[in-house]
Amino acid sequence: MYCKDCKFYKFYREDDIWDDSNFTKTGRTIKLGECTNEKIRYTDQMENDDELIYYDSEDYSAALYVGELFGCVHFEGK
């Protein structure tokens, strides 16, 4: 029940993983994507107790990315 196997997961890109202590690339990468489930929304008000909301305090846009091996209770297979 990982995001990579869920119908709501949309692959976005593959990123390099950086070592923050010396600002160098580690040689590893991570795949990340976006969740298109309506239970995950960019807003400042929850409507149900089974959703996730996110927003920024300056009213710009915010992105929420998930790793391929993340999963949640709203999983639906492809």
Image (cartoon, grey):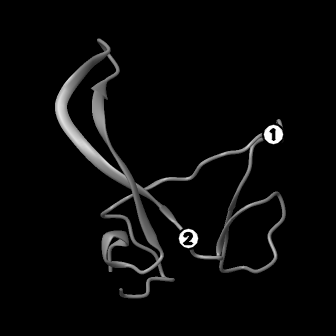
- Label 2 or label 1, whichever lies nearer to me, is 2
Determine the residue located farthest toward the left in the rendered image: 27
Left or right of 38 on screen, residue 71: left
Question: Where is residue 67 shown, x and y percent of the image?
Answer: 37, 56
70 in relation to 51, above or below: above
Instruction: Give the label on residue 43, or none.
Output: none
> Cα distance, mark 2 to mark 1?
22 Å
The residue positioned 51% from the left and 83% from the top of the image is 74
The secondary structure type at the circle numbered 2 is loop
The residue positioned 74% from the left and 50% from the top of the image is 55
13 in relation to 78, above or below: above
Question: Where is residue 9 shown, x and y percent of the image?
Answer: 43, 70
Q: Which residue is mark 2?
A: 36
For the C terminus, give its image quadrant.
bottom left
Determine the residue located farthest toward the bottom in the rendered image: 77
Left or right of 29 on screen, residue 53: right
Please tell me in which quadrant of the rendered image residue 43 appears.
Answer: bottom right
Instruction: Give the label on residue 57, or none.
Output: 1
What is the crowding at mark 1: few (fewer than 14 residues within 10 Å), some, or many (at least 20)? Answer: few
Kind of residue at badge 1: Ser
52 in relation to 13, above or below: below
Kind of residue at badge 2: Thr
